[in-house]
Amino acid sequence: MNQGWERVQTGGGDKLVKEFDRGDFKGAVAFLNAILPVAEAANHHPDIRISWKTVEVTLSTHSEGTVTDKDFALADEIDGLS
């Protein structure tokens, strides 16, 4: 599994979740903006939550109701941004 990503089971199916500490709010927003073109290029859009300096990214292939290879690939891409 991808470094630091946790696979969790929810009522909506399996998901990959990882929290990134970006130091401050400006860093968190910049990280979100870096994720945007990567997600668009993959045509795969994560759920993202920002709380001050942290960015929580949740990946799941909604149409499948679980984690697929698309999620692992996007997780790798996002890790490359850190």
Image: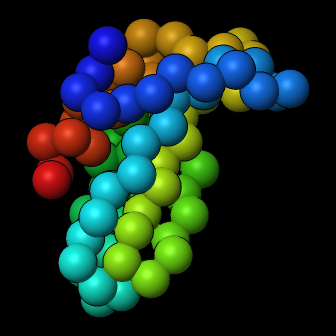
Q: How is the image coloured?
A: rainbow
Q: Would you place residue 67 above or below residue 36 in this image?
A: above
Location of residue 27 by image quarter = bottom left
Q: Position of residue 41 (x, y in %)?
A: 34, 42
- In the displayed structure, does residue 73 sit left or right of residue 3? right
The answer to whether residue 15 of the structure is visible from this angle is yes
Q: Residue at x 56, y 64 (%)?
A: 49
Residue positioned most to the right: 11
Q: How many numbered tags mark residues here? A: 0
Residue at coordinates 28% horizontally, 85% vertically from top-left?
Answer: 24
> In the image, residue 39 lies at what x, y percent?
40, 46
Task: List x then y, in percent, for residue 35.
Answer: 33, 56
Q: Quadrant of the N terminus?
A: top left
Can I make out residue 30 in this image?
Answer: no
Relative height, residue 62 to residue 48 (above, below): above
Asked whether 8 or 68 is in front, the reply is: 8
**Toward the viewer: 81 or 56?**
56
Residue at image position (39%, 68%) is 54
In this rendering, the answer to whether 54 lies above or below 44 is below
Q: Residue at x 59, y 50 (%)?
A: 47
How far from the left and from the top, in percent, is residue 31?
28, 67
